[in-house]
Image (cartoon, rainbow, N blue to C red):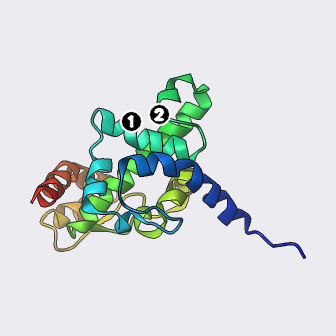
C-alpha cells in the first residue's frame, strides 16, 4: 500500500534539510519545521537582527539555503529574478526578526513572525506578506509611544514602530551581554 505524503510538509521538510547545514554552522539552537522566532535564544535572535557586514550575509545565506540556492557567496551569480526573490525574503525576514526583538521587550504584538514557523516564513514570504494583516506589528498600549502610534494610524503608524528598532536591538544586546 502506498504512503500518503502531505505535499506541503514534504516541501517544508526538503527546504529545512537544504538550509540546516548553514543554520547548524552558526547556531546552537535546534531548528525544526515548527520552530518559530519565539523559540530562538536571545543570542541567536540578536545575531540575526544585527544586519551589518557578515551578519547580513548570514541571513542571506540561510534564506538561500532554505530556497535551495546554495551558499550566500553564490548570490551575485544568480539570475536577476531569483536575486529579487532572495532580497524580498531577506527584507521580510529582517522585519520579522526585529519585530520579534521588540515583542520580547513587550513592545509589540500581531505580526506574521508570531504565527508562522521560520522555514515557512522564508519559503512563503511573498504570500504571507501579502495576506497577513496588519502589515506591521501593533504597538502595545503600555509603550510610551502608543498615543503617537494611534494618532498616526493608518498612514504613519508603521514609521513609529520602525523608529523603535535600533532601541530594541540595543536593549536586547545589553540583555544578552549580561
Q: Position of residue 40 (x, y in %)?
A: 34, 63
Residue pointed to by mark 2: 72
Residue 157 is at least partly visible in this image: no
Q: Is residue 57 above or below residue 133?
A: above
Out of 75 and 142, give the one closest to the viewer.
Answer: 75
Name the residue: 18% across, 61% down. 148
* Farthest-out residue, bottom: 1
Going from the N terminus, do you reach mark 2 or mark 1 first?
1
CB under 8 Å between callouts 2 and 1?
A: yes
What is the secondary structure assignment of the residue under circle 2?
Answer: helix
Q: Position of residue 163 (x, y in %)?
A: 21, 49
Name the residue: 60% across, 34% down. 82
What is the secondary structure assignment of the residue under circle 1?
Answer: helix
* Quadrant, the C terminus: bottom left
Out of 122 and 108, give the one closest to the viewer.
Answer: 122
Name the residue: 46% across, 69% down. 115
CA distance separating discs 2 and 1? 6 Å
Out of 167 and 6, give the one closest to the viewer.
Answer: 6
Residue 34 is at least partly visible in this image: yes
Task: Name the disc covering residue 57, or none.
Answer: 1
Amino acid at each position: 500500500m502506498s504512503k500518503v505524503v502531505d505535499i506541503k510538509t514534504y516541501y517544508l521538510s526538503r527546504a529545512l534539510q537544504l538550509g540546516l547545514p548553514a543554520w547548524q554552522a552558526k547556531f546552537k539552537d535546534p531548528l525544526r519545521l515548527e520552530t518559530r522566532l519565539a523559540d530562538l535564544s536571545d543570542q541567536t535572535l540578536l545575531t540575526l537582527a544585527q544586519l551589518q557586514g557578515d551578519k547580513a550575509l548570514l541571513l542571506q545565506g540561510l534564506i538561500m539555503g532554505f530556497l535551495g540556492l546554495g551558499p550566500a557567496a553564490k548570490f551575485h551569480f544568480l539570475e536577476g529574478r531569483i536575486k529579487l526573490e532572495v532580497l524580498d525574503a531577506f527584507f521580510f525576514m529582517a522585519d520579522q526578526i526585529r519585530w520579534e526583538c521588540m515583542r520580547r521587550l513587550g513592545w509589540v504584538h500581531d505580526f506574521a513572525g508570531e504565527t508562522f514557523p521560520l522555514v515557512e516564513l522564508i519559503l512563503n514570504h511573498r504570500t504571507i506578506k501579502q495576506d497577513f494583516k496588519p502589515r506591521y506589528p501593533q504597538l502595545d498600549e503600555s509603550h510610551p509611544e502608543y498615543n503617537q502610534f494611534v494618532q498616526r494610524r493608518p498612514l504613519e503608524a508603521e514609521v513609529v514602530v520602525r523608529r523603535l528598532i535600533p532601541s530594541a536591538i540595543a536593549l536586547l544586546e545589553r540583555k544578552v551581554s549580561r
